[in-house]
Amino acid sequence: MRRVNGKLVRDTVGLWPECNVDTARKKAAAMLVSMEDGVNPNIDTKHKRTMQADQRGVLSNILEAYISAGGSSEKRTRRSL
């Protein structure tokens, strides 16, 4: 836990079976150095997740293209036809 830009920040280094003690210590040391420089690791993690979601979000891209092409996002019923 460290303060980054005046806010208390806590982040995880990794999960135990995937990350042993030695690599966790190295990652933690690098993380603390970046936190001292003012980089919030939680924001970086959130940005990476967003980028991965955009790569996987094929269906949302298709829906946006459909709506922009003049399609409707409203639910159709028999009465509305």
Image (cartoon, rainbow, N blue to C red):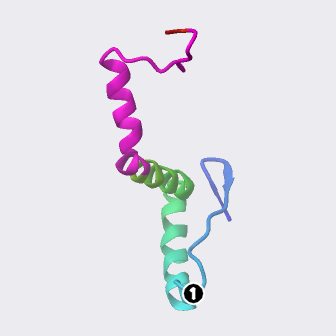
Q: Position of residue 77 (x, y in %)?
A: 56, 17
In this rendering, would 27 be left or right of 68? right
Residue at image point 34% right, 25% down: 66
Q: Is residue 49 above or below residue 72?
A: below
- Three-letter code, disc 1: Pro
- Residue ID for mark 1: 17
Question: Which residues are the magenta region?
Answer: 53-79
User: What is the residue that sits farthest to the top in this orientation?
Assistant: 80
Q: Is residue 76 above or below residue 36?
A: above
The quadrant of the image that shows the N terminus is: bottom right
Q: Position of residue 63 (x, y in %)?
A: 39, 31
Residue at image point 48% right, 63% down: 34
| Pick the front one: 16 or 36 | 16
| Pick the front one: 68 or 53 | 68
Secondary structure at badge 1 equals loop
Q: Is residue 76 magenta?
A: yes
Q: Is residue 39 above or below residue 33?
A: above
Residue at image point 56% right, 75% down: 14
Residue at image point 58% right, 9% down: 79
In this rendering, would 72 be left or right of 80? left
Q: Position of residue 69 (x, y in %)?
A: 30, 18
| Pick the front one: 27 or 55 | 55
Q: Is residue 45 magenta?
A: no
Q: Is residue 72 above or below residue 52?
A: above
* Crowding near the residue tagged with mark 1, few <14, some 14–19, many ≥20 C-alpha atoms within 10 Å: few
In the rendered image, which quarter is residue 8 located in? bottom right
| Pick the front one: 67 or 9 | 67
Number of marks drawn: 1
